[in-house]
Image (cartoon, rainbow, N blue to C red):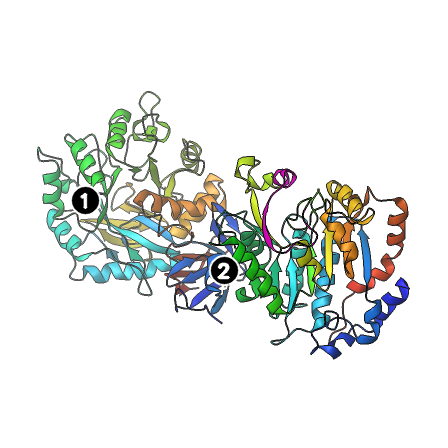
Amino acid sequence: MYYYTLQEDLINPNQHTAFQSENNAFARICPAPFRACMRTMKLIILNDYDQVGEWAAKYIRNKIINFNPGPDRFFILGLPTGGTPLGCYKKLIEFYKKGEISFKYVKTFNMDEYVGIPRNHPESYHSFMWNNLFKHIDIKSENTHILDGNAANLVEECDSFEKEIKAAGGIDLFVGGIGPDGHIAFNEPGSSLLSRTRVKTLAQDTILANARFFDGDLSKVPTMALTVGVATVMDAREVMILITGVHKAFALYKAIEEGVNHMWTVSAFQQHPQTVFVCDEDATLELRVKTVKYFRGMMHVHNKLVDPLPPK
Amino acid sequence: MPTNKSVSKAPITQFVNCRILRDHKLQREDLWVREGRILDPEKLFFDEEGYADQRVDCEGLIIAPGFIDVQINGGYGIDFSQATSNVRGGVALVAKKILEHGVTSFLPTLVTSPPNIYHKVLSEVKVHSGGVEGAGVLGCHLEGPFISLEKKGAHPEQYLRSFQSGGMLDLIETYGTLDNVAMVTLAPELPNSEKVVRELAQRGITVSLGHSVANLSQAEEAVQNGASFITHLFNAMLPFHHRDPGIVGLLTSDQVPQDRTVFYGMIADGIHTNSAALRIAHRAHPTEIYGNALLVTDAITAMGLPPGRHTLGQQVIEIQGLHAYVAGTKTLSGSIATMDMCVRHFKQASGCSVEQALEAASLHPAQLLGITRCKGTLDYGADADLVLLDDAINVRATYIAGQEVWRK
């Protein structure tokens, strides 16, 4: 059943454009006859960090091109920050420079931002997105959305972020990472799986993990952040999680081989209709050999999703 | 396409495909300019939701801050120390021509002259910004007449002066005014010089030591009183001696106040200073890891002119190849190398990096004059005075306030 579904997906990549007027969550990516079977979990296993970045970037590229965005039809992309997506962003910039992709009709919503550090602080997520993606591509500032950690009223800022996502028509593809404690965005262990965009106090694990960006000085790391909720990401039509490195291996194991649990919030995506986990070999070290072999065996099929698309 | 106009309606230029000198390193970054100043693109993006109106493709060139020449006596037949009928026109001609060498700001320099020359020239030459007409004038550099007889070099002996009891009064009587004066070179061993050094420094005028036979402690005292520059190190001063290094000893003196940097001017034309001596100076920097060398041309009237005889101040000089002598002698009377030649030669002779060589001609002069907020850097908010260079440090284009003023 899974294999059959995938084949249909590949044979009719352009069928989704037939139903653009409908607001239904699946209409924009999936034609009616195949809607029932477009519920998939894919685990993409690659050799190393660089391959993960490249695969993910190609996947995003193909999604955008297939979507065929235009002035009345933006592709809505959710984006993360941190070390994991850097390779992916570098590749996306490369594709833009080669002319394979344009971000003119793409809107972005970032997952999170620190509270209380200046927007132009070198470690703010605004600076991260500017330096690692926005300044290299043709995206318009008004189409980017990043939570403002210096807003006068943080709760209002979070609420209006949710409203902006809704006004844009919902997120087509939410890209995210995973923390060593299994968190998605800043939804730390114990976060409600039904949570929405809100202010969060950061867990000690997260502060330690972030210290390397603040000269190793724990006192300089912000302790609060604004973050999208688990349910906010679950609302996206498709979710792609990038996981690289041995220090994420246990979290990946908890996320996909154990149950849905609010202590490992990424596990919530076991109940999302369309999720892709992209990881490197190191990140699979805590998985069962059987799981890894199964998904490695699917790679020749999965790789077709990132093949260059024929020119129009 | 441009901004949402929340801050400014002025057009924005984006220099792409370039390497810019920022934070002492050449970095692959775009450079953004609006209203003649360097713009912060991140602020533009997030605050104003703006982007560039026009892009300039630099084809891989280096963008450095425009060069600043703090010692240039003239060029192309113009002698700043001569009271011609058109002083302003003369300064303007040189200002225009030196754009080709990447110089965007300079200090017209006057050698030892009689008071009437100072009175005339200083009343005509004003501080003003550069532009299409030529490099900007930051003020005048008065090299003399309060210098040492033994180290007069090419300066005319009959106009040398010393400080009588008046000190500053003598100075003002000689020069007429201190308006539009940015720098004064004097010999600190002259009696009554201490008060003069202090007074000038307090007025914000850079005091430089040169054409002097001062010993090290006289030089250190002058620095403590406010002197911050050495005019053409090694030339027109006592040579280094191991029991009294003289002014040269300032390079490694421990008597220099902590908060002060003493810069030294270097005529890096391959003639005024032997490369080995240049390297000794370059490697001796005290606390500044990026050095305190400052490149000057000390260019004379004949710079830009063919070989032969020409006038400098009240004397005649003779060009032979790249050398310029006081006519009939072997005394060097100044240089005819251009600023970009000096930068190239300094890099090659000292073995320093491209960044250090470029900073010696841009950042350090700005630091010396205390104008780094708007000159000598490519920091956000600084004036967009730029020089575009290839990897061999040849000038390809010059910009002042974001406007192209010369292109090869």
Q: Are marks 1 and 2 in contact (CB under 8 Å)?
A: no
Indicate yes or no whether the magenta region holds residue B160: no
Left or right of A122: which side holds A68?
Answer: right
On residue B269, the disc is none
Looking at the image, tell me whether mark 1 or mark 2 is earlier in sequence order.
2
Q: Quadrant of the C terminus of chain B?
A: bottom left
Question: Residue A207's x, y, as percent?
Answer: 61, 40
Farthest top residue? B243
Question: Residue A181's x, y, as percent?
Answer: 71, 42
Q: Which residue is mark 1?
A: B112
Identify the amino acid type marked 2: Phe
Left or right of B348: which side holds B237?
Answer: left
Q: Which residue is mark 2?
A: B46
Left or right of B378: which side holds A262?
Answer: right
Distance from Cα at disc 1 to Cα at disc 2: 55 Å
At horizontal 72% and vertical 69% (from top left) the residue drawn is A25
Range of residues picked out in magenta: A191-209
The residue nearer to you, when weighing A213 against A113, is: A113
The residue nearer to you, when weighing A258 against B233, is: A258
Q: Nearer the viewer, mark 1 or mark 2?
A: 2
The residue nearer to you, when weighing A307 against B239, is: A307
The residue nearer to you, when weighing B217 against B274, is: B217
* Relative to B104, residue B206 above or below: above
- The chain that hosts pointer 2 is B
Question: Residue A203's x, y, as percent?
Answer: 63, 41
Q: Secondary structure at mark 1?
A: loop
Does residue B269 appear anywhere in the picture? no
At horizontal 56% and vertical 57% (from top left) the residue drawn is A158
- Quick one: label 2, few (<14), some, or many (20+) residues within 10 Å? many
- The chain that hosts pointer 1 is B
- Quick one: label 1, few (<14), some, or many (20+) residues within 10 Å? many
